[in-house]
Every structure is written in structure tokens, then in C-alpha cells.
Amino acid sequence: MPVPFHTLTRGQFDLTWSLFEYHLERLEPEDFRWEPAALCWTMRGGPVGGWAPDWADTEPDPVPVPTIAWLTWHLGWWWSVTMDHLQGRPPRERSDIAWPGPGDATVSWLRGLRTEWLAVLDRLTDADLDRPATFPWRDDPAHTVAHTLGWVNAELMKNAAEIGQLRLLRAARAAD
């Protein structure tokens, strides 16, 4: 008997999150804004307080190396907007997603997004999986909510691996 899609995607998500949690538990405030290269994207103090991400509407060449700060903001941004779309809410603008800052506040924010995501997953029915999804694939009617769920798992895995690798690299360099 085939594994139901909900079971498969939830299992993938839970595995990815458990690997991510390993790094979340070990992040230090100093890890977030550590710049691993001269050319990097990070979060900078905003003109009226808060934090603002480095950003370009067209991907630069070469691509800047992101900091953990930037990656955690980016993860929070795409995940929040994905949930807006799936719940029928007007999607927030990139500038509306506030990064809490280095340390426990960001870790708590990401864990809160996980809790919200699990609630979204629990409400989805098999019929919902076949509905068209416009995010993140603007104007492509071939993609469904099921595609979005797979994309979230892949994007989370990628961001978790990047954050973990940066954390490990900073720790290794600090030990030298």
C-alpha cells in the first residue's frame, strides 16, 4: 500500500526539523552576524530601528555568502509568506517580515513558525493538495499545494544545512 502524501511530507518535515534543531540548540548570539567572507549578505540595523536584510531584486554575480542572521530572516520570510498563501491571507511583503535579532529571540521565532506550520499541515485535506498554488511559482497553474509542501521541505532542508555549516565553520575557526 502506498504511503499517503500527508504521511510522507510530514515525515520529511519532521526529519528535516530534527536535524535543524541540532543546530538551533547550539547557536550562540555571536554566530548570527559572523561574516564568513568579505562578500556577504547579513542583517543590518535599520534606519528607524529593527533590522534590514541585504537584498537585491536581481541576484548578483557572484552571489554573496549569507550570514546565519540573513538565512534565519530569509527562512522566516519565505515560510511566513507561504503560510499566508496557504491560509488565504494577503501575503506580506518582504519588508513586513521583522527579524527578531541575534540569539534566542530568533530561535523562538523559528520554533513558533514550525508550530504554525504544523497547524497548517493538520488542517489540509487530501482535496487541498490538488488545489492550484501560486507561491512560490507565480503565474504557473501547473503547481499545486502538494508541490508547495514539497518545496517547503526542500527549502527548509537547504536553509538548515546552510545554517549548520556556517555554525560549524565559525566554531572550527574559533578553535584555531
Image (cartoon, grey):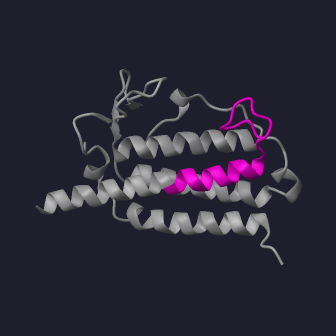
x then y, percent, for residue 142: 79, 40
Q: Considering the image in quadrants, where does the C terminus appear? A: bottom left
Could one spot residue 101 in this view of the protein? no
Q: How many marks?
A: 0
Q: Nearer the viewer, residue 107 or 148?
A: 148
Name the residue: 44% across, 39% down: 99
Which image quadrant: the N terminus?
bottom right
Q: Residue furthest front?
A: 61
Which quadrant of the structure image shows residue 27?
bottom left
Residue 119: percent from left, percent from top:
70, 57
Residue 58's spot in the image, x, y percent? 47, 24
Report the magenta residues as a range: 133-157
| Above or below 21: residue 131 | above
Q: Is residue 151 magenta?
A: yes
Query: Which residue occupies 78% across, 45% down?
Result: 144
Residue, far left: 176
Q: Position of residue 89 (x, y in %)?
A: 74, 36
Residue 134 highlighted magenta (yes or no): yes
